[in-house]
Image (cartoon, rainbow, N blue to C red):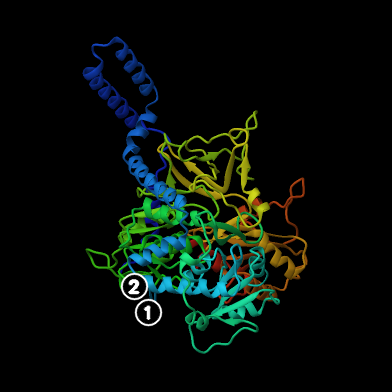
Amino acid sequence: MSECKPHRDLKEDEKAMEILLELNLKQKLATRLGILLVGCIIFGLFCYDSALASLTLGALLALMLRNPTNVFALVMTCHRDIIALHRFVALNFYLLRKDRKGCTVAHCFEEQARRQPEKICFIMDERRLSFAQALRLSQQVAGYFQQRGLQRGDCVALLMETRVEYTCIWLGLSQLGVITALINSHLRGDSLLHCIRVAKACALIVGSELSDVVQTLPPLELSIYQYTDVEQHELLPGAIELTSALAAQVPLPLSRNPPSNARDKLLYVYTSGTTGLPKAAVITNLRFLFMSAGAFYMLRLNSDDVVYNPLPLYHTAGGIVGVGNALLNGCTVVLRKKFSASNFWTDCCQYNCTVAQYIGELCRYLLATPYKHAPQQPLHQLRLMYGNGLRPQIWTQFVSRFGIPQIGEIYGATEGNSNLINITNRIGAIGFVPVFGRSLYPVQILRCDELTGEPLRNAKGHCMRCAPGEVGLLVGKVDARRAVSAFHGYADKAASEQKLLRNVYTKGDCYFNSGDMVVCDILGYFYFKDRTGDTFRWRGENVATQEVEAIITNCIGLSDCVVYGVQIPHVEGKAGMAAIVDPTQKVDMDYLSIVIRGSLPPYARPLFIRLLDEIPRTATFKLKKRELALEGYNLEVVKDSIYYLNRDGVYRQLSGEQYASLQAGTAGL
C-alpha cells in the first residue's frame, strides 16, 4: 500500500516547475555557437560566391547573435509548435465544416448513433445506455415536448443529479431549438430561484431526488415535470410525471424538426463570474463543439477511449467537455453521481478506462488516499488525465505516484475565449501560445493594477503587453467569425458588457477580460497566478462574495459584512471568510449556522467568521478586503473572535489546536 510522500518531497516538486525567464550563460553560449555553426554551413553551401548573399547572411547572424533568446525559443519550441499547429488546423477544419453544414450537437450525435448503435454510450454504476438507446430517448423527449407546445427559443430549467439520462434530456430539447438551463443541483433558496428566473424558463424538469428542494421555493409560474427512476415516488403538487410519459412517447426523428444551425443557442451554464449571483453563460452549438472537440483534437483522444467523468453534469467540465466525447466523437463515457476518492481507481479499473478527467481539488483528494498497485505496473489503464487546476506543487508527485503517462492541463472559462491547453506535460503550465504565432491566436497578457485588476494604459490610452515574467491580466481578442475567439456572453446583456475591454490596442478592438492573473515565460508557456475581483475559488467552484454577503446580512441584519478568500497551507484555492461588524457580540452563531447551511451550497459556506468592531475603509469609504484577507485567520495577529465551521455544520470559536492542524495540513480539508 502506497502512502503519501513526506512534506520534503512536496518542496522538491515545487522546484520541478521552472519558469524560464532568461537564458543562463551556458545556454547563451550554446545558442551562439549553434548560430555560428549553422551560419558557416549556409555560407559554404549557398553564399560563398555571392557578395550580396554573404552580406545578407552576415546581417542576419549579427542580429541573432545579439539577441540569442528568440533563436533559443524557436529551436526549443519548434517541435512543440509544429505538433500543436497540425492539431489546431485539424480542429478548425472540423469546426468550419460543421459550421458550414449547419450541424448541431444533435446532428453530430445522431451520426455517431447510426454508425455504432450497439456501442455503450454512458455507464453509471450498473446502468448502461447504448448509443441507439440514448438516441431513442432524446427523440422521445423531443416528441413529447413538441406535443406540449414548446418552441424554438423557449427555455427549460433542468434540476437533476447525475444519471445516464441527464444528457439525453437536454439533447432532446435541443432538437426543437429549446434552450436548457443546467441548474447546479446544490443550489438552494434565493440562488436557485434566481437561476430559474434569469434564464426566463417556461418549464422545469426536476429529478425526484431534488423534489424537496423545489418544495421550499415560493410558487413557480411554470410547468413542472418530475423525472424518477424508481417505481414508488411522490409527485410535487401540480407536477407532471415524466418517466412513464417518455416511455410511451413515439420518437420524433431529427429530420422532422424545424431547421437549425450551429450558431443556435443550446445551453445556459451558470458561472459566478466576478460578482453577484450566478450568471447564465450562453453556450451555442458551435461553442459546445469547440470546447469538446478542442480537448479531443489537441490531446489526441480517439473514439475507442473509455472516459471516466466523475464531475457534475451541470458544469462545463463534466457536462460539455466530458460528455461531448460521447456525443461528438463516439467514446464511451463513465459517469459517477458524486466523486469518490476511495473509488476513483476502482472505477477506472472496473470499466477499463483509458482517459480520466480531473479538477485540481480532485487530484489532491486522490493523493490523500491509500492506493494499491503492483510493483511494476499500476492497476489502471489510464494513458491520459485532463482537466484544470492541477497544482504545480503536487504535479510531479501525482504523476509519479499513480503512473499517469500524460497530463492535459486545460485553461478556459465557460463563457470566455481565453482558452489554453498544455499538450506537452510541461509541469505547472496551463498552456502555451507559439512565440511567433500570437497573431494567429490572440491571447494576451496586459499590464494591470494588481490590487484592482484594472488594465494600465499608456499616454495614448492603449493597454500594454507584459514582458516574460511580468504578472498581468489574461485577455482574449473577440472575433465573432471564429469559434475559438467568439464571445456569446450571458443571458443578461449588461453582465456580458462588463466582461469586455474595448480599445485595448487599437480603436474599436474588443477583448474578453478573464479576470485571471497569469505570467508567461520566454518559451510561450502560461502559468496561472491568481484571480482578480471579488471571486475566489474553493472546492473547484467559483464563489461570488456578494451572494454570500447578502445571505449573511439578511440573516443578522447588520449593515457591514464582507466576504473574502484566505489561503490555507497545503490546500488549493482560497477558503471563504466573513468579517462581520459586531462590537457588542450579539450575533447568534447557532442561528447563523442554520441559515448558512440552508441557503448556500457547501463550497460557498465561509469556513471562518470574524467578529470585529469596525471594518477598515479607504478614503472613498470602500471596504478594505485586502487587509482583512492578508490577516486571514491568524490567531497570533487577529485579536477579534474567529469562528470555525466544524464538521457538524456549526460555527464554534477557533481553537489553538484547530489552528495548528490547519497550518500543518492535517485538518482534513
Q: Which residue is mark 2?
A: 346
Residue 633 visible in the current orientation: no
| In this view, 331 is above or below 421 | below
Q: Position of residue 648 (x, y in %)?
A: 57, 77
Q: Nearer the viewer, residue 565 or 303?
A: 303
Category of crowding for the residue at label 1, using alpha-carbon neighbours closer than 10 angstroms: few (below 14), some (14–19), many (at least 20): few
Query: Which of the marked residues, 2 or 1, is nearer the chain's N terminus?
Result: 1
Q: Position of residue 13 (x, y in %)?
A: 38, 52
Q: Nearer the viewer, residue 346 or 628?
A: 346
Dot 2 falls on a residue whose secondary structure is: helix
The amino acid type found where label 2 is placed reads Thr
Q: Which residue is mark 1?
A: 126
Q: Position of residue 168 (x, y in %)?
A: 47, 70
Q: Residue furthest bottom?
A: 232
Q: Residue at x 59, y 32 (%)?
A: 506
Q: Residue at x 62, y 61 (%)?
A: 278
Q: Nearer the viewer, mark 2 or mark 1?
A: 1
The amino acid type found where label 1 is placed reads Glu
Q: Residue furthest front?
A: 256
Q: Residue at x 65, y 28 (%)?
A: 459
